[in-house]
Image (spheres, rainbow, N blue to C red):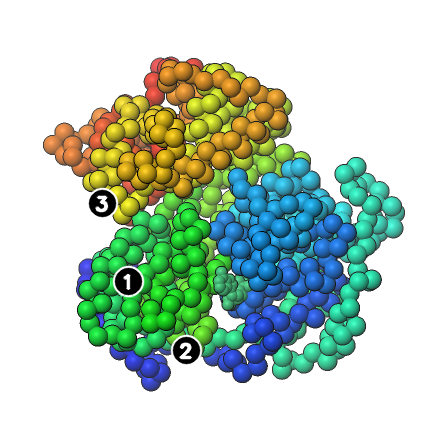
Amino acid sequence: MFQKPGSLSKAAFGVKFDGQQQQQHHGTAAAAAEPAAKRPKNGLPVESVRRELLYLVESHATVVVVGETGCGKTTQIPRFLHEAGWTADGYQVVCTQPRRVAAVSIAQRVADEMGVAVGTTVGYGVRFEDASNQATTRIKYVTDGLLLREMMDDPLLTKYSVIMVDEAHERSLATDTLLGLLKKVQRRRPDLRLVISSATLEVDRLVAFFDSSTVRGKAAAAAAAGGGGAPSRTPAVVSIPGRVYPVQHGARQSSSSSGSSSGRRWRGATGTAVVSIPGRVYPVQVHYLLDNCSDYVQAAVQTVVDIHREDVPGDVLVFLTGQEEVESAVRMLDEEARRLARSRLQYKLMAAPMYAGLPGAQQRLALEPAARGVRKVVVATNIAETSLTIEGIVYVVDCCFVKQRAYNPIVGLESLLVAPTSKASCMQRAGRAGRVRPGHAFRLCTEESWQQLLPKASVPEMQRSDLAGLLLQLKALGIDNIMRFDWLAPPPAEAAVRGLELLHALGALDGDAKLTPSTGTLLAELPLEPQLGAALLAAATRFGCCQELLTLAGMLSVPAVWASPAAVGGKRALEEAKAKFAAAEGDLVAFLNVHRAWLEHGKSHRWSSRNGIHQHGMLRAAEVSQQLCRKLKRMGLDTNSSCEGDVDKVLKAVTAGLFMNAAQFDHTEYDPRASSDAGSNVYRLLRHMQPGRPLKLRIHASSVLARTRPQLLLFLRCQQNDEGWYEMQAVTAVEPDWLTELAPGVFQKL
Ligand code: ADP
Ligand code: MG
């Protein structure tokens, strides 16, 4: 960790920032490139490569597109393809995003630009939410995970003529997997085109990956042979190119005349082409702290205030790691804004949060331009790094940390962890400041710390995730040997083994690692983590409490059910609100209590806001439950059963899914004098009790069990704090006998 106590004032940044003179801490972030001089007609750089791009898509199976964030890749390329005829004959163009919030808000933006309503010509699809229409939607934005799911019903993705995999450089778990699968699909579908957008960093790897097969040769041969060997679902090979494209001619000409001066290039016709979009970025001056700070949220707020006091125009984008930090910074900034309103500055300060679980209407506040005379400060998580473009940003304040998945392959435990981000990601973040005019980026650490402690690039998600869910889906797609799968970079063998172990313990795989028809196939179809899915199946098939588990699965699949402390007037108020629903059994029964009371009060928004409940979260959770219910019905399961208040049934069903996450209270570590300190209440992962250096677990402060010490509990998720504690969330107390009864392969009576 690079925080050490220190204080921040304006002078604490090695430079005073009042213009262009000081280049003292100039970073490599965004080099000067051609400024706005050569502005194409809609103002977006991507417009200048439109014709080349369309030509290349027509003549190559795969086109890799490189360009600065904000140059128009995501919003414009699908539209170009649509206008050029790729959506004729009922086909769709689909564009994947690693983040749900990006898919939704970009679809909204593109629909606005095209003057249509979302869900008509332009639509989106994310887990549990479909705003598209097979008959009318031509351009669709989806999460990478959703497209992966669509492959289970339609392995060749026959609806789509072009699949654009956006943000491939992010190396998300689902995007990496999709790339491997799409490469296979290409062999069966010569008509399919891939467009892959990436930051410069990963281009060579992507090109090498797609060029390492004889895609076109094989595809052409297969087509000539009448598609022999193709599964029955394969349609007749459709040859789209060569007829409808008015751009083709012009594009060919420009291809021969494309000079290096334009900044474009593409590789030969081996199957993969690269287009780089000429950039339009301004220099960004990077500033570091002179001393590291102990609290980056506070430091970020102070930096924003300092920027604001300079009283020159320009919006600010602050990067923090999670919703709680974002909300607390926004609260602090609101206070500062009230104080600053009395001073004679020309601008008013307005803070707007931006994070994944934020309701759409509030997201718009961050995305839309501020009113005149207002300085907008968008306080965001990592989602504003590349997926979303926020207009008008001149200052970036970067905490240099990120919240990400971490995986401990020894015990097979995934957690969320706040860790220093990578240099590449800091550069991306800084780049956000150079879109309108020369900008400034403030990194909340010393230059020395930045150089020494930050890794060069981020580790792909595949290397730091629980793979069970992914393996289950691949098995369902017929990919049995995942180590032989054509990965962009293979997952660690150890993690794969742990994933298979879990699936086996859940009964999803048999002794030969094949999907079991009773559990495995059903589980693969449920859009839930395997453990939660297994609990739901157990509730429906064994314990007669399907209704309750459907409710829980919904509530556990949305970002928040409790209101944020800010919304109810502080942490204490929230705790008091939670206490009304608390149950000795833990968070899951408390959730059921919340749900029952919410129904009794007619799902009233007023009631929710008075009782510390996140109304939007509840509504979404109800929607998710309904979808899961429909899914179970389609599988032929009875969904009507209810435990009628017998919570043991519910807890048993939960145990049948979550048994691997059983933790036992560790008496040896318990110090009664320190009972108020949650840190003394150590839990150990039950299936990892061997000596050595076991993990230290404790109950997360958000749990209704935070102040208690049940002997044995199960948790759904956990988060690592910076002292190395694994903090368990969605915690529920269970009986030891249930473990031996429901997971005899894993736990035996002593
Ligand atoms: P890229 O994918 O290359 O990073 P985008 O296609 O997302 O770029 O964005 C292109 C441009 O469209 C941005 O520079 C911005 O001007 C505008 N834009 C995109 N989304 C929004 C939005 N939600 N609100 C306002 N402007 C937007
Ligand atoms: Mg984009």
Read off the residue under disc 3.
570
Where residue 660 appears, x then y in whole percent? 42, 28
User: Distance between the Cα atoms at labels 3 and 1?
Assistant: 21 Å
Q: How many marks?
A: 3
At numbered mark 1, what does the secondary structure look like: helix, strand or loop?
helix
Position of the N terminus, as image quadrant, is bottom left
Question: Residue 402 falls in which quadrant of the image?
Answer: bottom left
Which residue is farthest left? 673
Identify the amino acid type marked 3. Answer: Gly
Where residue 264 appears, x then y in whole percent? 64, 74
Identify the amino acid type marked 1. Answer: Ala
Read off the residue under disc 1.
300
User: Distance between the Cα atoms at labels 2 and 1?
Assistant: 21 Å
Where residue 23 appears, x then y in whole percent? 35, 81
In this rendering, would 528 be left or right of 350? Answer: right
Read off the residue under disc 2.
438
The answer to whether the residues at label 3 and label 2 have Cβ atoms under 8 Å apart is: no
Of pointers 3 and 1, the one earlier in the residue sequence: 1
Front-most of residues 731 and 462: 731
At numbered mark 2, what does the secondary structure look like: helix, strand or loop?
loop
Identify the amino acid type marked 2. Answer: Pro
Front-most of residues 329 and 113: 113
The answer to whether the residues at label 2 and label 1 have Cβ atoms under 8 Å apart is: no
In this rendering, would 671 be left or right of 295? Answer: left
Q: Is residue 642 visible?
A: yes
